[in-house]
Amino acid sequence: MNQERIPVNLLTGFLGSGKTTLLNSWLRDPAFADVAVIVNEFGEIGIDHTLIAASNDNTIELSTGCLCCSVSGDLVTTLRELNEKRARGEIRPFTRVFIETTGVADPVPVIQSLMTFPVAGRYVLNRIITVVDALHGQRTITDFEEAARQVVVADDIILSKTDLAAVPDELVALLKARNPSARVLLSSSSAPVMPTQLLEPGAFNPQAEVRDMDAWLVASGLAPAKADEHSDAHAAHRHHAHDHTHHDHAHDGHAQHGHTHKHSHHHHGSDFTTFTLTFDEALAWEHVAHWLDALVIAHGDDLLRVKGILNIEGQDKPVVVQSVQRLFHPPFQLPSWPASGASSRIVFITRGLTRDYVSRVLATITSRPEPSRLAG
């Protein structure tokens, strides 16, 4: 029987970021009534005992309807057991999952687990949410590789503790440089981010119904936002997004252009670089697949995040590709092209790889003779 997959949101954030405080407040929210929350230790989130309605092994059922489950062995085992208990009726049905990682955890292995069979047969990665401390976030991201990775892979970045201090412009600029496609949300003790803002279908979820294609592209970093949606700091980012640079190695007459953000910040001797490549003509899927495979084989650890919407030869609908390091999510089609047109756009967030180098890899692949020509 073909079972609909359960969307999973990953909640990450460095030590002291405030993610546990946020999660504890969400447990009381009616919006979490059909959510199963996976944590490392119950004691770490300090569940209010007055909320506990029932407990079963490593699972606690709250009176709000939310399920809390501690990790049993490894994450894959926990997800499998959770699904089996749900199927047997041992726990209350749930339709969504939230996973909280430890503060010092590299989120990439967790993401890879969620995108790997057989877990991917029952669950689908939906959104990656990273909490950043508005007070100390800039120094944390600069000093700790794990914190930087948590920002790079995020779909949503929650700036916490904004009631304690104004958000530094330098921190906003750093976040947009590290991950220009992420949505930034402000949170304080008096006005925390509401869970309803985080439960909508995300770009990783191919089952999501994309009602507003242009909004989806903006949220994914694949299209510029409207001028009135951004602050001055974001406007500076848009200025770079419209700089077109044409290369001598443009393949098969395809006009390609993009923008590159390079940081002065170093993480253990490495630079994080973000750039976008745009192609005006349809691409051959064989070339795209070989291109991305070559980058993964040679530089998988430095290919931190890839997100793209592609015009593929022979396809009348856009194809979405995305990856976290070495693991690419299965490509899927969107229902239609946006009003902005059918050009291919692909965003790279890398460690040390330049736009010029990535473009040259594609140019090398597209310039290879076809096997039939070699045979002649």
Image (spheres, rainbow, N blue to C red):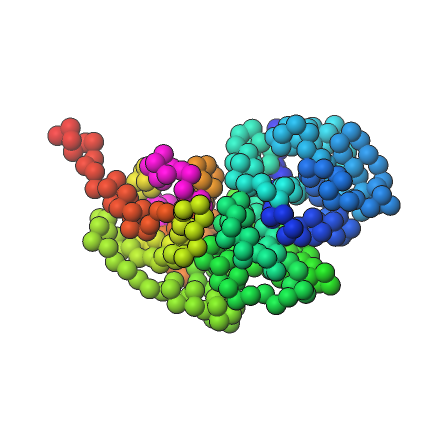
* Residue situated in front as seen by the camera: 270 or 230: 270
Q: Is residue 253 left or right of residue 257?
A: left
Q: Residue at x 54, y 41 (%)?
A: 106
* Residue situated in front as seen by the camera: 322 or 38: 38
User: Measured from the top left, where is residue 266 in percent x and y?
Assistant: 43, 51
Q: Is residue 334 left or right of residue 97?
A: left
Residue farthest along the right direction in this orientation:
50
Q: Residue at x 71, y 63 (%)?
A: 191
**Quadrant showing the C terminus:** top left
Stretch of the chain drawn in magenta: 292-315
Locate residue 183: give its quadrant: bottom right
The relative height of residue 362 versus residue 91 in the rendered view (above or below) is below
Q: Is residue 113 left or right of residue 241?
A: right
Residue 13 on the magenta span = no
Residue 299 on the magenta span = yes
The relative height of residue 63 versus residue 75 in the rendered view (above or below) is below
Q: Is residue 366 left or right of residue 116?
A: left
User: Measured from the top left, where is residue 261 in percent x and y?
Assistant: 39, 58
Visible residue check, residue 369: yes
User: Measured from the top left, where is residue 259 in percent x and y?
Assistant: 35, 58
* Residue situated in front as seen by the camera: 89 or 147: 147
Q: Residue at x 71, y 35 (%)?
A: 70
Visible residue check, residue 253: no
Q: Residue at x 45, y 48 (%)?
A: 267
Count of all numbered marks drawn on residues in the image:
0
**Quadrant showing the N terminus:** top right
User: Measured from the top left, where is residue 291 in percent x and y?
Assistant: 32, 40
* Residue situated in front as seen by the camera: 229 or 283: 229
The relative height of residue 201 versus residue 240 in the rendered view (above or below) is above
